[in-house]
Image (cartoon, rainbow, N blue to C red):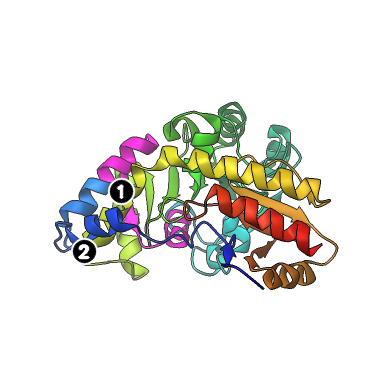
Amino acid sequence: MTGQLIDFRSDTVTRPDAIMRAAMAEAEVDDNVIGTDPTIAELERRAARTLGMPAALWTPSGTMANLIALSVHLRRGDRFLATRGAHVLTNELGSAAWLAGGMPDILEHDAGPGRCLPETLEAAIGNPGPYFALRTTLLCLENTHNAAGGAVTPPDEHAQLLSVAKQAGLTVHLDGARIWHAAVALQVPPAALTVGVDSVSACFSKGLGAPVGSVVAGSVEFVEQARRMRQMLGGGVRQGGVLAAACLVALDRVDELAETHEFAKRLADGLSEHGWDVRTPDTNIVLAGVPDVPTALNWLGSLGIQALPMAGKVRFVTHRDLSSADIAEALRRIKAGA
């Protein structure tokens, strides 16, 4: 291996820059468990407004934000629906069942990557059965869909799924860990992608440079319950304004994600030219089909290129700590090493 490592493992590997670190150092703080940290309060107000929700709650992680939402929405033994490979199904260590008490069921991607058809959702919900049948009470959507390669769900398809779910009496939670990416790709405000949902989570450490932090948003009553659940899960951070300050800076940088999407398209085009099995990405995640994923990852590692497996493929994620030159250099190494 020659040259510097090029890190495509995730958009969570970004590091706070000098501007973000200065904001963290200068943040006004108090005790957030008591409810008096002004910087967290400012972030929650701004995040709620940006997401089109009445209220929001800061959480240490996206996994906690999702778990809080599911714990509030589900009764023990309730069935909930999510698309195949959804983060709440495959990347949160069974907490939806273990801690929130939900019974998960899968919706296939028959409307495109990460998306199901409205009629598929309707059939999956079914009709209410006798008292001893499972109760289907919750739909979990994901936008962008990580395991589907950062795929976006446009507002019209979102609205169709919401209509089916609401007609059946379901609550809807949106895992919007990368909702900022979806909004930039679709050139719509983030609030256009949350219409009708009962809760939404959003993350500030995926591509925006913040070291930690998410929010879960919904009605005022939902956030009151969510705050209690966060405390039960150990998420009651004291002087959390230090971290919330980074999230506020991250919110100012959402438009910059367009550059990482362009980098991903450039990378996908280059990989395709070299014979890799890739599709043009919607956002900043490139999934490449290869005959043997571990072998491919080891070979990339020997070239100084870091990536991770995802959904049986090699996943490359572009982010703010990569440059145009890094994309060109990665493609040069892959071509030279082939």
Q: Amino acid at mark 2?
A: Val
Q: Is residue 31 magenta?
A: no
Q: Is residue 63 magenta?
A: yes
Q: Which residue is pictured at 62% across the width and 66% down the height? A: 306
Q: CA distance from mark 1 to mark 2?
A: 23 Å
Residue 241 in picture, x, y percent from top left:
22, 58
x 39%, y 50%: residue: 216
Secondary structure of residue under mark 2: loop
Q: Quadrant of the C terminus?
A: bottom right
Left or right: where does residue 273 sit relative to residue 195? right
**How far across and down, in percent of the image, does residue 276 sit?**
80, 52
Task: Judge the density around disc 1: few (<14), some (14-19), many (≥20) Cα neighbours within 10 Å.
Answer: many
Find the magenta span and give its range: 44-70
Q: Is residue 63 positioned above or below 270 on the image?
A: below
Front residue of 209/180: it is 209
Q: Residue at x 81, y 60 (%)?
A: 290
Residue 326 location (% of width, % of height): 58, 54
Confirm whether residue 72 shows in the render.
yes
Q: Is residue 171 visible?
A: no
In the picture as drawn, the residue positioned furthest to the top comes out as 156
Task: Name which quarter of the figure residue 190 lies in.
Answer: top left
Q: Position of residue 245 (x, y in %)?
A: 25, 54
Which structural element holds mark 1? Answer: helix
- Report crowding for label 2: few under 14, some 14 to 19, many 20 or more residues within 10 A (C-alpha): some
- The amino acid sitting under disc 1 is Val
Q: Which residue is mark 1?
A: 249
Tell me how many marks there are. 2
Which comes sooner in the sequence, label 1 or label 2? 2
Task: Tell me the quarter of the picture where residue 33 sits.
Answer: bottom left
Which label was assigned to residue 33? 2
